[in-house]
Amino acid sequence: MMKIQAFEPTEEMYTALVLIEKAIWPDNFTTLTEFKHFDATRSPDFYYQRLMVTVDGHVIAFANCGETPGSHLPGKYRLRINVHPAYERQGIGTAVYNHIIHMLYQRDPQPVLLESGTYEHKPQSIRFLQKRGFKQVMRWIISTLDIQSFDASRFAPLRQNIADAGIAIRPLTMQKELDPHWQQHIYDLDWELTLDEPLPTPPTKLPLAQYVAQVIEQPNILHEAWYVALHHDRYVGMTQLMKSETDPTHFNTGFTGVVRSHRRRGLATALKTYAIEYAQQRHGRLLRTGNEEHNPMYTLNRHLGFTDLTANLAFEKQTT
């Protein structure tokens, strides 16, 4: 007998989340620590609900639905349904979707916009969303780099040009020692870059404390491989690197960007080469990243040697 119930934050339930996540998305980095960190730091001011689906007491699916603090609009909700591959095509996704929609229509405000997503190599999931009136609105290409094949020496002239222009590139661990207000400066830089990031809906600025908790203190982000670019002490660019808890040879790229006044100088490329070199020196094998398909950062990554793996697709449904 199938049962849909609210998530209980027990070790057993968290472990079940990770096992289902890995069964569906084996290349994803989401770990037990990250699930717990998200739950510990998400803002209670925004509605969020996680559901667990069991059959005879065995967890076979989970789902998330809620408001989006980073791109908030009244009546906008994001939902995601994750069914273990062994239980697909049994009507479970439909039952969970109907359950979520019923919950959301009991809320004030009622839904005016629903967001969801899946990967391009999951045609069944795409059909599921399309059948329910969702339309694709954005596509992020996921690509990977063979770290050990990367030749950082070919970028030495570019790095020198950057240095000669008076721009310093430092790991965050070093910058922390030089700037007592580094958190505020990173926060301001991130927001300036986010305003130029391709997104389905406009971003909402998080409070500084929330940004520190969710991003700066994210458990798998590497401050020693979070490189910042500074010009006359102004923060003008950054790139982030995250570790994998399950495979020390795998890394993931976080947010990379350069402020408008300092673009077209190769600064983003230089920043990324430092991060790749960091991973290379630690015997890394695979680096993963994602970019909106029309973003110049995608072309930059191709130049660095990244090759396409799949694409992350954003879907929306207008309900009014």
Image (cartoon, helix red, strand yellow):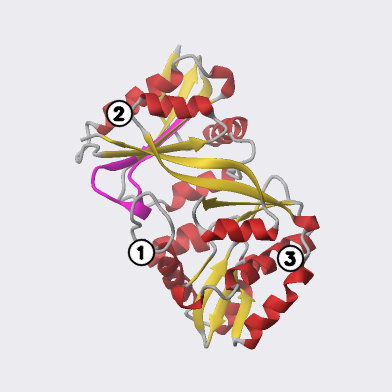
Disc nearer the start of the sequence (2/1): 2
Indicate yes or no whether the magenta region holds residue 185.
no
Q: Residue at x 66, y 60 (%)?
A: 303
Callout 2 amino acid:
Ile
What distance separates the C-alpha of mark 3 from that of mark 2?
Answer: 47 Å
Callout 1 amino acid:
Pro
Indicate yes or no whether the magenta region holds residue 68.
yes
Left or right: residue 90 versus residue 208 is right
Which numbered disc covers residue 101?
A: 2
Q: Residue at x 50, y 57 (%)?
A: 295
Q: Quadrant of residue 50?
A: top left
Q: Which residue is drawn at 51% across and 63% down?
A: 216
The quarter of the image holding the C terminus is: top left
Farthest-out residue, top: 1
Disc nearer the start of the sequence (3/2): 2
Which numbered disc covers residue 277?
A: 3
Disc 1: which residue:
207
Residue 61 visible in the current orientation? no
Q: Of discs 2 and 1, which sits in the foreground?
A: 2
Q: Of discs 1 and 3, which sits in the foreground?
A: 3
Give above or below for 192 relative to 9.
below
- Please tell me how crowded label 1 is: few (under 14), some (14-19), or many (20+) other residues with Cα within 10 Å: few
